[in-house]
Amino acid sequence: MESNAVIVIPALNPPTSFPSYIEALKEEGFSRIVVVNDGSRTDKLPVFFRVKRAGAIVIDHAQNMGQGAAMRTGFRYYMEHFQGQSDGVITLNADRQLPASDAAKIASSLHNEQAMGSFALVVGTRNLLGKNVTDYDYNMGGVMKLLYHMLMGVRLNDPLSGVFGIPDLRVPHCLEVGGDGYAYVTSMTMSFEKIGFLQVPVSYANYEDDAAPAFRKIADTIWILFTIFKKFIFYSVTSLGASILDVILFGIFTSVTFRGNPMAIIYSTICARVISASVNYLLTKHFVFHFKSDSAQETTRSAGAFFLLSAMQCICSALVVSTMKLLLGGNAVGIKVLVDTTLFFVSYKIQHKYIFKDDKKKEEAQVPVQGKEAAGRPEQVLNEEVSVDV
């Protein structure tokens, strides 16, 4: 059965079996396959020649630019030649060749989702409990699954599969995601957290016999983990900076501005907190959650919710510390550190999920009429997993 989707495969020093894989995809009904030669060795040129003869479009990078850069090259080609004429893009790997029948499952799910008005990211989900699964894939898959759930509230069973079905409407969105290496895949996946995911079971594929994997387990794993924690790290830095500013301003107000005033401490506390909280809001909005809404209503809503949360956090801290001190005794400072640390994580989750959630209005304006009813659906497919028969 002919597939409407376009396949994009970044390839660095692909195995000799790669042309045969292209032929298998062609036989499965994929007539449009884009392969990006990401600066492979010259001895691999015959492989790419056979890939062209098999019917794929080959785009060459003069030098190795990384997995993310190669994927974006493929996406740009898609935008120039196929956008609006296809269901979207399916990303596959050259050295870990997913069975063509599984690629067809991804294509079928991508088509069906858009027919229903959903523009979620289709994720090929491997069974990481099988006997052929490597220790790295099993362990890293478990860690990533836990981190996605803890930090983003998303239940993805296999965030690192690298097999995706990207709806036509969302390809420009993927081009805006930064990063050139393997961490790009993580950044791209995370960028869909507010849009939604559809998980489709696919086979686990090991590396081909003569594949030369470019993935560096230590270096690339560090970058992937940094990508996951980056938002939380920035959130921690901005919060710490706001706390330091609060203390500095308090000192200035008490010793200079309100010096000699009987209410100096109260006035200084209020003024310092208002200024530091305002700075914290702006930094969190623009540099942590990248909240880009131009709507005055949305900005007012997020600012009001942020300051209300800050006030509730302060009140809750005082009440809980006082109660625990009364009931358990001990050092109040130690109790406060424990309580405030817990509230810090709770506050992050609330801000991430509710206060700085994406403004969908602009995106909805770009959605075709037949897809408008999907505006409320993406959240419903976050944890959905389907089995597709092709």
Image (tube, rainbow, N blue to C red):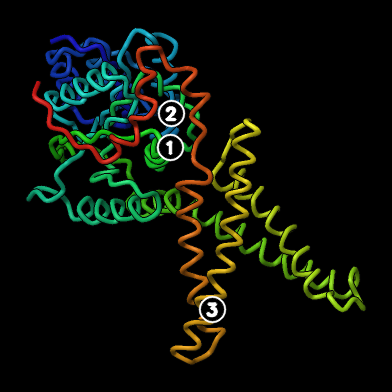
Q: Amino acid at mark 3?
A: Lys
Residue lying at 47% horizontally and 53% vertically, measured from the top left: 350
The answer to whether marks 1 and 2 mark residues whose Cβ atoms lie closer than 8 Å is yes
Which secondary structure lies at badge 2? Answer: helix
Between disc 1 and disc 2, the foreground one is 1
Residue 52 appears in the picture as rendered = no
Left or right of 320 on screen, residue 31: left
Marked residue nearer the N-terminal end (1 or 2): 2
278 up-or-down from 359: above or below: below
The circle drawn on residue 336 is 3
Between disc 1 and disc 3, the foreground one is 3
How much space separates mark 3 and mark 2, taking CA atoms? 43 Å
Marked residue nearer the N-terminal end (1 or 3): 1
The residue labelled by disc 1 is 191
| On-image quarter of the C terminus | top left
Which secondary structure lies at badge 1? Answer: loop
The residue labelled by disc 2 is 174
Which quadrant of the view contains residue 222? Answer: bottom left
Q: Residues within 10 Å of mark 1 (few under 14, many from 20)?
A: some
Which quadrant of the view contains residue 80? Answer: top left
